């Protein structure tokens, strides 16, 4: 009973550590099992920012206009993940604006593993199990009609007749992860690189965030 009461008290106290000045960002690419991180954040009492308003700011972030996302982060939650937080340069701006924050880079076993997971998800969601085409993404109604196509152009930059080009996307995945690791290499304690397929992954995240 005492332990149960302690846990009930500890959860909001720990969550209070992450407030308007200190945030948690999961910046792994979509397709690296980030929903598991969102669930863990909620279990720890870290309010996860609503995804849809953030996604509507993705075009601004892709064009290096970060005013909207900075305002959103200040007031809409304590923990954040997926687009637009995993877009190139967004994490750098957020680190400068929220210098006490922590960042989690979720990864897969290999670029090919990530590619298969990501394209399989898109195929199921947007093209009845087939690899989506330009037409499929333009007709997709996620967020709003055409948003998926806009994001594809902003993020992937692949040929329009080969929008899921395997070689290009795997290289982009590698380059992005390397850029994150390089940026934080002289910032100890700020970044955790974790593969959620490993059994100790959620424990490592809790430990990284000092939720023991």
Image (tube, grey):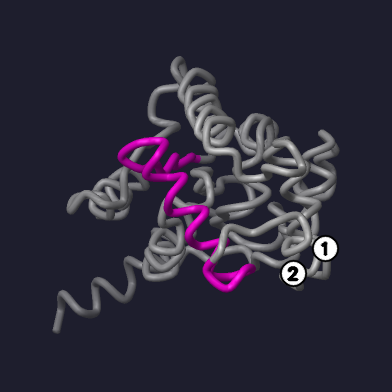
Q: Which residues are magenta?
A: 102-129
Task: Give the distance between the C-alpha atoms of the residues marked 2 and 1, in whole angstroms.
Answer: 6 Å
Q: In this image, 161 relative to 179: left or right?
A: right
Q: Position of residue 10 (x, y in %)?
A: 32, 66
Q: Nearer the viewer, residue 95 or 50?
A: 50
Taking the view exactly as shown, the residue that stands out farthest to the bottom is 1
Q: Earlier in the sequence, mark 2 or mark 1?
A: 2
Foreground residue among 130 and 171: 130
Q: Among all residues in the image, which is located at the extreme top? A: 186
Q: Badge 1 local density, few (<14 within 10 Å), some, or many (20+)? A: some
Q: Quadrant of residue 4?
A: bottom left
Task: Using residue 58 as the reference point, say whether residue 125 is left or right of it.
Answer: left
Locate residue 129, reporting x and y percent: 52, 69
Tag 2 residue? 140
Q: Is residue 115 located in the magenta-colored stretch of the structure?
A: yes
Residue 148 drawn at (x, y percent): 74, 59
For the point 68% across and 30% down, the residue is: 89
Q: Quadrant of the N terminus?
A: bottom left
Quick check: marks 2 and 1 in contact, CB under 8 Å?
Answer: yes
Instruction: In this rendered view, identify the residue nearer to me: 160 or 76.
Output: 160
Q: In the picture provided, is 140 more to the left or to the right than 50?
A: right
Disc 1: which residue: 146
Where residue 18 appears, as percent x and y from the top left, is 51, 53
Label 2 element class: loop
Q: Residue at x 68, y 49 (%)?
A: 84
Residue at 48%, 23% (x, y): give it: 178
């Amino acid at each position: 009973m005492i332990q149960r009461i302690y846990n009930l008290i500890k959860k909001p106290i720990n969550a209070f550590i992450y407030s308007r000045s200190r945030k948690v960002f999961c910046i792994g690419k979509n397709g690296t099992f980030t929903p598991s991180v969102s669930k863990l954040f909620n279990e720890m009492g870290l309010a996860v920012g609503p995804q849809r308003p953030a996604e509507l700011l993705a075009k601004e972030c892709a064009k290096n206009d970060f005013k909207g996302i900075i305002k959103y982060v200040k007031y809409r939650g304590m923990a954040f993940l997926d687009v637009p937080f995993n877009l190139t340069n967004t994490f750098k701006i957020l680190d400068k604006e929220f210098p006490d924050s922590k960042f989690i880079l979720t990864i897969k076993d290999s670029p090919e593993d990530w590619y298969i997971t990501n394209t399989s998800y898109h195929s199921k969601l947007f093209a009845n199990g087939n690899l989506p085409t330009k037409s499929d993404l333009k007709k997709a109604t996620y967020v709003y009609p055409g948003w998926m196509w806009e994001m594809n152009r902003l993020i992937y930059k692949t040929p329009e007749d080969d929008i899921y080009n395997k070689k290009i996307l795997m290289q982009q995945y590698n380059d992005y992860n390397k850029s994150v690791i390089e940026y934080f290499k002289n910032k100890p304690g700020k970044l955790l690189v974790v593969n959620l397929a490993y059994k100790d992954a959620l424990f490592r995240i809790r430990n990284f965030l000092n939720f023991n």
